[in-house]
Image (cartoon, rainbow, N blue to C red):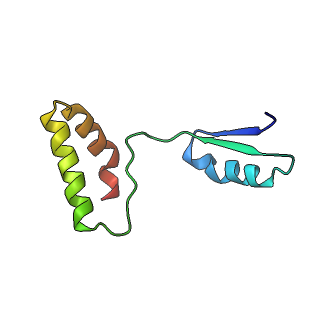
Amino acid sequence: MGAKGIRIEEPENVREGLAEALAYKDGPVVVDAVVDPLALAKPSHSPFHTVKGFTLSFARQVLSGRLDTVIKEIERNVGIV
C-alpha cells in the first residue's frame, strides 16, 4: 500500500518515533505503538460513577475467579494513584 511503518516499543522512543512520522512527507505513515494491556490511564478527575464502575469491575473479576488478573493490574498500576 506504500505506507511507511514506524514501530515504537519503548517509552523513551515515543518522541523520536512521532517526530519521524510527522516529518515524513512522501505518503501515509502507520505508527505501531506497543503498550501494556494492563496499564490504566489516570484521569484528571474521577466522577463517582466512574469509581463505582471500576470497583464493580474488579469485584466481578474476583467473583468470576480472575483474581490473578486483578492482582496483575494492581501491581502494574500501583504507582498511578
Spot the residue most to the front.
Answer: 1
Q: Residue at x 75, y 50 (%)?
A: 20
Q: Residue at x 85, y 51 (%)?
A: 25
Measured as percent of width and height from the top left, residue 53 is found at 23, 54
Side of 35 relative to 22 (left or right)? left
Side of 74 relative to 20 (left or right)? left
Q: Residue at x 23, y 32 (%)?
A: 68
Spot the residue most to the right.
Answer: 26
Measured as percent of width and height from the top left, residue 14 is found at 62, 50
Measured as percent of width and height from the top left, residue 17 is found at 68, 47
Looking at the rendering, which quadrant does residue 6 occupy?
A: top right
Side of 79 relative to 57 (left or right)? right
Which quadrant holds the N terminus?
Answer: top right
Q: Residue at x 33, y 54 (%)?
A: 79
Measured as percent of width and height from the top left, residue 65 is found at 16, 30
Which quadrant holds the C terminus?
Answer: bottom left
Looking at the rendering, which quadrant does residue 43 occupy?
A: bottom left
Looking at the rendering, which quadrant does residue 46 occupy?
A: bottom left
